[in-house]
Structures are given as structure tokens and as C-alpha cells.
Amino acid sequence: MLSEIKDFVKANFSDILLFIIVVLLIMLAFASGYIVAKYQSKTPITITNAKNS
């Protein structure tokens, strides 16, 4: 069992490494976008002359 996993990792090391790098870059991009959006100052939306229908 362990030898099969070891052989699989050896055979596909470059693909596994590429997958890990892509996932880390995606998480970094999401986290940086989340942080920027969280601290971005926005003016609140105000509704004037609201009518009830």
C-alpha cells in the first residue's frame, strides 16, 4: 500500500507539484481580494422618497 503511493508520487511528482502551486496561488488571490474588499471604504446606500405600493 505505502509502496504504491510512493511509486505514484514519484511517477507524478511534477503534476502534483504544479497542482499544489496552482491551489496556493488561487488561495492567495482569494485572500488578498477578500482583505482588500474588507478594508475598502464604501459609502452606504441611502434610499430617499421610498414609496409603499
Image (cartoon, rainbow, N blue to C red):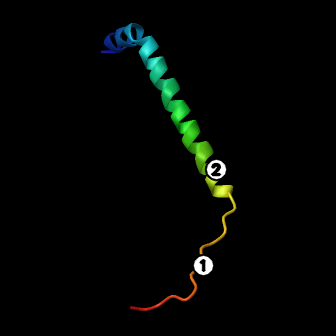
Question: In which image quadrant can residue 6 be found?
Answer: top left
* Disc 2 packing (10 Å; few <14; some 14–19; many ≥20): few
In the rendered structure, the answer to whether residue 31 lies left or right of residue 7 reads right
Q: Residue furthest bottom?
A: 52
Q: Nearer the viewer, residue 29 or 3?
A: 29
Which residue is found at the position 64% from the left and 50% from the top? 35
Amino acid type shown at disc 1: Thr
Judge whether 12 appears above or below 24 on screen.
above
Residue 22: percent from the left, percent from the top?
49, 27
Identify the mark nearer the N-term, 2 or 1: 2
Residue at 52% x, 35% y is 26
35 in relation to 5, above or below: below
Q: Nearer the viewer, residue 53 or 9?
A: 53
Quickly name the residue at label 1: 46
Q: Secondary structure at mark 2?
A: helix
Q: Which numbered circle lies on residue 16? A: none
Q: CA distance from mark 2 to mark 1?
A: 25 Å
Q: Quadrant of the N terminus?
A: top left
Residue drawn at (54%, 31%), measured in percent from left and top?
Answer: 24
**Residue neighbourhood size for the residue with mark 1, other residues' Cα within 10 Å, grouped as few (<14), some (14–19), many (≥20):** few
* Amino acid type shown at disc 2: Ile
Answer whether labels 2 and 1 touch (C-beta < 8 Å).
no
Q: Quadrant of residue 42?
A: bottom right
Q: Position of residue 33 (x, y in %)?
A: 60, 46
What residue appears at the point 58 percent right and 44 percent down from the top-left corner? Answer: 31
User: In the rendered image, which residue does mark 2 sit on?
Assistant: 35
Up/down of 26 relative to 37, above or below = above
In the rendered image, residue 5, in percent from the top left (x then y), is placed at 35, 15
Q: Quadrant of the C terminus?
A: bottom left
Label 1's element? loop
